[in-house]
Image (tube, grey):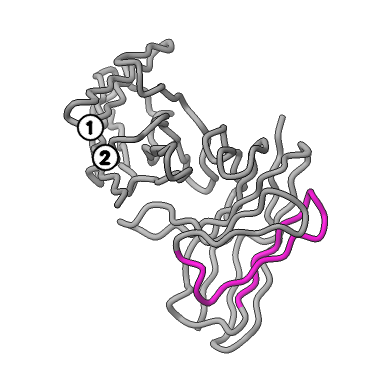
Amino acid sequence: DVKVTQSSRYLVKRTGEKVFLECVQDMDHENMFWYRQDPGLGLRLIYFSYDVKMKEKGDIPEGYSVSREKKERFSLILESASTNQTSMYLCASSLGGGRRGLATEAFFGQGTRLTVV
Amino acid sequence: GEDVEQSLFLSVREGDSSVINCTYTDSSSTYLYWYKQEPGAGLQLLTYIFSNMDMKQDQRLTVLLNKKDKHLSLRIADTQTGDSAIYFCAEYAGTASKLTFGTGTRLQVTL
């Protein structure tokens, strides 16, 4: 079974802190994604990566950055956390193909609920 | 631009059929998906349909696609309490290589 593991289920951080959300997948998938999930807005893509050290902006990249130093690990970084970044963050992975890999089945982690106070 | 809309909530009795609806705007959609999110979990792919199909059946699940009206539905026969979850439809637009999720429909199954 594909496993996508997010390092924390719940996080509480202060405004202005630098926050790291970590995600690891064990199926050698090329593509990895970070989404945020908000009630009434569905899932919105923040960033995705289709290879090591490659990244592409999604729909809402402002206030976020990412790092993919190893194929299995994709980190989401909030440089200076703000209260409007309080949300559920979901990591996903899928088989490759660049942006066309978005069409293949995505496997999701269990999510990290981040609260910024 | 791309827009995928769903109603936010649906309540059905156990044993009845559930129908979850989705509308989308991008006529270049190539694939359409239904994902399920159980409480406290990530999303899991339930089923998908190619845009050149109009129906797909998989055990208790039936997906209907009306391409003319850009309307997608998921029918769950004999709904069980374990079907209680949030259901997301998503469309992949081939020309833009973009995947767009809907807002999600929370299905509540009552006894």
Q: Does the magenta stretch include residue A111?
A: no
Task: Count residues near mark 2 (Cα–Cα under 10 Å), then give few for <14, some for 14-19, many for 20+.
Answer: many
Which image quadrant is residue A112 in?
A: bottom right
Q: Name the residue under label 2.
A: B24
Distance from disc 2 to disc 1, alpha carbons, whole Å, reads: 6 Å
Left or right, B102 with respect to A72, comes to left
Coordinates of residue A1 in the picture (x, y in percent):
72, 29
- Say which mark, if any, is on residue B36: none
Q: What stretch is highlighted in magenta?
A: A60-78
Which image quadrant is residue B12 in?
A: top left
Which image quadrant is residue B56 in?
A: top left
**Which chain hosts label 2?**
B
Coordinates of residue A4 in the picture (x, y in percent):
69, 45
Q: Do the residues labelled 2 and 1 touch (CB within 8 Å)?
A: yes
Q: Mark 1 points at which residue?
A: B70
Coordinates of residue A52 in the picture (x, y in percent):
77, 54
Residue at 36% across, 37% down: B89
Task: Count residues near mark 1 (Cα–Cα under 10 Å), then give few for <14, some for 14-19, many for 20+.
Answer: some
Whether B80 is drawn above or below A55: the answer is: above
